[in-house]
Structure formats: structure tokens, C-alpha cells
Amino acid sequence: MADKFKGELDPQIAELLTVNDGQENGTNPDFGTLSGEAGLKVQNQTKAAEKFHKIKIIEEKPKPLFNDKDFYKKAIQGEGESTKRVHDFLTQFLNAKDPQDKSMYRARLIPAFWDLASSISGKISMKLPLCKILLLRYGILSPSLITPPQQEMLSKIILNNKTGHPLYYIDEWLKRIASGEENISATDELKRTQKDSNQKILDKMDQTKGQRDSEILLLKNKLTERDACENQLVLCVKNIMNHPAQGLEGLGEPYSGDQKRSMTSINEILRKLGFLDRDISRSYNTLQNLEQNINMLNKKADGVQVTAVDSEQVISEFNTIRQMSKLCVGRKGNHFPILMKHYLRPNIRDLGIRENIINELAFVESLDAGLFLRTYKNQTTRIIPNILILPNFGEKGICWEPFERKNRSSSRGRVAIPLYPKNLHIAVISACADLRWQVAKEKALHYWMEEGITGNYYQWFQNQKLRGDVKEYFINDYILWITRESEGTQKLDRTVRGIFWRLMPFPQELKDKLRNRGYVYNELFKKDINISKSDGY
């Protein structure tokens, strides 16, 4: 089988075929020597399929991030007109005494800062000074705008991604976009330009690679299932071969009832292995054809750069991130994009840093086990979305897209969480709720008002004659489900509680506890028992 894939072999397929390509995965690159090169390319996401585990060490020793006396000057210089505008408006904003004047200069400073950051983002693939990287990552324009204790706290944040999970600060994410490791985020406001033949080929290649990734996930699941069957087969054979020497002259006994049942099981296992082998062979043939198509498209592209992304696309991605930031903050929130001392909370555990977000996600997933599960061709895989950490003062996390348009089965999608949230616990839960809603809605397609989680919730929403955004109601109820109902405090409508209990169930051990916390939970528990004896929900 391996001979079919000689030549340009995809690393994931090589892994399936146990081919050693001489490369080792899982090494974390350093941040450099803090000289400005933020080389934070994350290793292959081999750990991303694992469950989230609580991270105990969330900080490291303070680093000299803010020792440069010319930090502010280096951060804004070289960005054309944006440099002058930011400097002028910042000076006027800080010196203004009248509240109205201060508000006016503040309003002018906000778009000027975004233009400055956008200009910097277009150069992300170059070797940027550390201060520009920190401006993108933390929203720090000048260290003088925050206190020395706050500077020390920020300098303790772990810079490198040592978790193996796809959580990225802005500079890290833009680097991945610039290098072609990630596609730009989808937006409804993209300009429709006529594509040349090469671009069409590259788009087709992206689509084919998405199909290949999906087939690889399916194949891995089949191989895992085959291993389980083979292990079960070995146990059955060992059981049959066990003949205790008892009775006349210590001769072996005939097959026992349990051994005869093992014989029956062997026939069933062999039958199942035959079906699995057929599916596995089909997957390998499909992968071979997809690889041939990708190689053919590569030749047709005739030297077109498929990995490099021009600065305009990176800037476009940054502008999309700006829209994500607005959604995180909300209409009535604090849209000021510059880190100021009176906006920054004093405890590092309150910040939306990578390690804290993982700890919060571990909590949510412990209560909602199906949060990151996606089913494709009757095979369920755990896929963590790309999580972007945005330096804003947002109140909630959001799901920008549940998965990429060209690869609905295995792509990660996009989720954004604020770095300086009002309440990190709520911000992460709201992001999970938004992800839950959008995945369910996309899965149901035009039946989203009738089927699944969204359909059941929408029907209740209509029956209650409520007004407003149904998704916002769902997110608020999901927050109550995770924070209050999981503790036995009844805060949801009875129908909503039933929907969540069935379609986003708590772990069984928690259900066992809740049944003793009140009549409503006990009734839901009894319904589970009755349904388990029937055909299901």
C-alpha cells in the first residue's frame, strides 16, 4: 500500500502509513531573544485532539519587555501618516482638561490607532521591533500609560504557545495568515474581483486539501476502530485457548459456555474487520486520488506561490479582527483600543491569556462534553476551533465562523475572546455558546428553525412570543445552564432546561447528583431512563 504514495507524500498520510520522513513534531520555537522577531509558529497540532487539562503554571519570570526608553517612539515610527495622527491625538487626549474636549480627542484617537496597527500588521512577516509586536498583542502604545506593577504583571505572561492548542494572540495569528498556514477569515464584505486562472487553481487546491483532511480524519477513526477489534479478537482467542487440566488424569476440559460465546464473538469480530478493511481500502484509494489531484493542480499553478500571502490580505485579515473586536465589546462597551492603567485589572488570573482561557474551556467542556465534537460520515471527531485572543475590553467571546466554507468537516473555524474582559468566566462561556449555536445552525442548514438544538430552541422562542435576537437569548440561557443549572439552581424555563438536558447533556455523574437536588431534575432523569428503553429521543 505504501508504494502507491511514493513521491511527494503528505506528512499526515505518511504518519498513517508509519513512514518516517525524518522530521520531528512537537517542538516549541522560542520567542527569540526579545529583539523583535516574534517567531511563534506553533508546532503541528498533535496535542489539539486531547482533552483540555487545567494548567497550574499560568505565568513565568518577568521579562524586560518595557525597559526600552524609546518604546513609544519605536512603536509608532515608520507608519506614514498614521504615526503623526496617533501622536497628535494622543498628546491632545492626555493633555485635555475639559471632559468634552477629552471625549472628542478620544474619538479621534481610536480610528487613528486602528490605522496604525493595520499598517504594522501588513509588515508582520518582516522582522519587527518588539514594541510593535507588543502593540499588536497587548494594545500597548506606551508603557507610561500603565503602572509599574501592571507592567510587571504583563511581563509575566507566557509568550510562547507551550500548550499545543490553537490559541493565538493577534501577532501570532497574523503570522500564520502571512505564511499561508491559515486561510483568511470569511467575511460578507469581501470585494468580488474577477479571479485569474491561477487563483481559481489555488482555490480548487484548497478545496481538495480540505477533502483530503476530512478523509484522513475518517481513516484515522477507522484504523482506531480496527485496532480495538483486533485487541478484542486476541482476548477471545486467548480465552478459547485456556483449557484447565482437571478431571480424569489431568486432561483438558471441553469448551465452557463462556468460550463458546467467545467463538461466536470471533465470527462477529471477523465480519466487522472485513467491513472495516473494505472502508480502509476505499479511504486509501480516495486519498491516493486526492493526492494525485493536488499534485496535478500544483503543476497547473506553474510556480504560483501557494504559501506566501501579500500584505493586503494580511491587512484585510486585521480589519476582520477589528470587526471581531467590536462584536466582543458590544454596542455599549468600551471600544478604546489602547491599554490604559484604569482599564487593566490587577490580577493576572482575570486576564484572557492563553493559559487562563484553556482553564476556563476545560471547565466548560467538563459540563458540555459535546462542545467540540463534529460528526462526518458517522465518525465523530473532536475539533477545537482557532481561538483568537484580542486586546480589547470586551464583555463576551464570539464565534466568527464555526468552520471554513471549503472544509466543513475538519476545519477549525474562528472564535475570538477578549484579553481584558469584564469577566473572563462569562466571556469564555459566551464564546462556547455562540460556537454551539452556529455549529448546530450550519449543520441543520435551512432546517435550523425546525431541527436540532436551534430548531427546538427557536420553537420555544416563538411559542413564548419573545422579541429580539434568538441567538442572544440562547447564549444567555447557555450561560445560566453552565453556571447555575449545573449547580442545581433552577434559573431556566422548564422547556429550555429539557432541551439542554437532552441535546447538550451534563455528564452522567452530574446528572446523578442533580436528580437529588429537586423535583424537576429527578423528572428529567426518569425521562432519560424511559427513553433509554425506547428508540431514543
Image: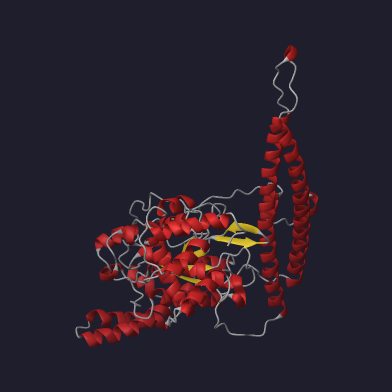
Q: Image quadrant of residue 285?
A: bottom right
Which percent across, then down, holds residue 365?
A: 47, 57
Horizontal and vertical percent position of residue 94:
25, 79
Which residue shows up at 53% across the image and 69% down it?
Answer: 453
Compare residues 537 and 349 and report the one nearer the observer.
537
What percent of the width, then of the height, locates residue 362? 44, 55
Res 103 visible: yes
Looking at the rendered image, the quarter that the C terminus falls into is bottom right
Q: Is residue 20 left or right of residue 177?
A: right
Name the image quarter holding residue 478.
bottom left
Residue ranking furthest to the top: 249
Let me know if residue 117 appears in the view: no
- Residue occupying the point 41% across, 63% down: 481
Residue 441 relative to residue 238: left or right: left
Report x, y in % for residue 319.
Answer: 48, 78
Q: Nearer the viewer, residue 235 or 438?
A: 235
Q: Residue furthest left?
A: 97
- Please tell me which residue is depicted at 69% across the width and 33% down the height of the picture: 258
* Point 41% across, 83% down: residue: 81
